[in-house]
Image (cartoon, grey):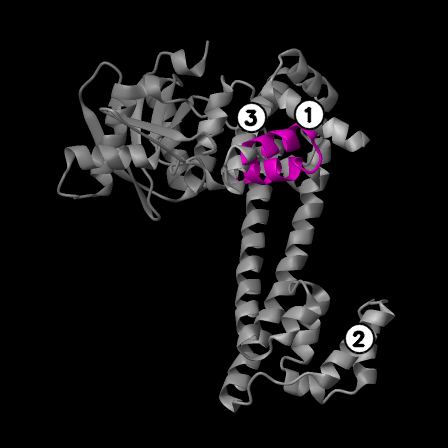
Amino acid sequence: MSKDNVEIAAFVGLDWADQKHAVVVQEAGSDQRDRFALDHTPEALQNWIQSLRDRFGGRPVAIALEQKRGALIYALMHVEFLHLYPVNPVTAAKMREAFHPSGAKDDPRDADLLLDILISHRQHLRVWTPDDALTRSIQLLTEDRRHVVDERTALTNQLTAALKMYFPQALEWFGDLHTTRACAFLQRWPSLQQLKQATPSSIRKFYKAHGYRGDDKREQLVADIRKALPLIHDGAILLAGSMKVQTLVTQIPLLTEAIERYDQKIAALFEQHDDSTLFGSFPGAGPALAPRLLAAFGSNRARFEFASEVQELSGIAPVTEKSGGGLWIHWRLACSKFLRQTFQEFAGRSILQSDWARACYDLLRKRGKSHHAAVRALAYKWIRILFRCWKTRTPYDEALYCNSLKTRRSPLAAELSVAEKSALT
């Protein structure tokens, strides 16, 4: 029997907090509610779980809470008789606004609200079934890796802004500022004035020590430094700018090293996963995006029944609003930003390696779509293909799909034929 259809012995509303959790329990068939606060300690949680087991004889207990991750749900998710029903925070907020227009909010009241939602609208909620440990490891690591990348990007943007203020030549000379060599160079010579005091031999030694073998480019850089002129001579700006640059370039390499460690660990775990061949078969996925696609779908094939669920969860599917004779189609705001980013980045990469994806993108651009709108529309199509392959455990076959487009006489088939003819000529 599905967990969604089992007979529940009791219903629980649990409002999470940092120190204490507000809990309200209502036994099935009863209107009486027990309310109390639960300390956020391992001992208190385990004692409460045992009390529920003893009170209801190990029969299923449904718990509504506003999270899918965190210390609380991690402590509860493997208890066999607890059925966890995550409630979207937006849903809870709208219900709170409907019944409490004043905006008043407190944890016990929120716990009651979650319990009301669970009892009255359980058919619209889905019991949460965690993926296996390997899949969850990949899911957590890929998200954390992305956060580290975003942190490095933010620091690199700050570095770019600082250099533009007093040392703009560095932006042309070093290319990607997050590289180890660029950061080490700026750590040693954070301003043009300091750099011009260095001898050409010391600059050559620096590049040789950092494994740079481009002799022509190195000599060109030495010549550019010799004839370069400072943008400013203000001592205060030079001092503040140099200090900021040196501070930033000590942090960026640490994040780069962290990203490399994440890549190694994710690659090792991904290789162990049963679905690694499946998600690695998609054109443009590569070592970074294939694990993220796996993380997006997970290993539980019962999690999604239709591809549209993935399209909506990720925010790739647009929202249609109708009112009277008006119609407004816009992109989805309430969604997983990480999933949307994953599918959009994959769709963008696939254009370079998939014939039909390139044809689809070109066709959408001819119809007046912007680049980002065309990529989102392509991602919408890719999700259906990914979903089908995931459900049937079948690796992707580019030739098979392109042939199916021609068999169905899809508009993309004509674009494919044009592309094939162009390639031959």
- Mark 2 and mark 1 lie on one chain; the one further toward the N terminus is 2
Q: Position of residue 365 (x, y in %)?
A: 55, 36
Residue bearing the label numbered 2: 220
Q: Residues within 10 Å of mark 1 (few under 14, many from 20)?
A: many
Mark number, residue 352: none
For this rendering, which residue is in front, 12 or 268?
268
Q: Position of residue 176 (x, y in %)?
A: 66, 62
The residue that appears at 34% across and 48% down in the rendered structure is: 19
Count of numbered circles on the image: 3
Which mark is nearer the camera, 3 or 1? Answer: 1
Q: Quadrant of residue 17?
A: top left
132 with respect to 394 (left or right):
left
Residue bearing the label numbered 1: 416
Q: Is residue 209 visible?
A: no
The residue that appears at 13% across and 43% down in the rendered structure is: 102
Q: Position of residue 367 (x, y in %)?
A: 52, 32
Q: Quadrant of residue 57?
A: top left
Q: Quadrant of residue 90?
A: top left
Callout 2–callout 1 Cβ contact below 8 Å: no
Residue type, label 2: Gln
- Mark 3 and mark 1 lie on one chain; the one further toward the N terminus is 3
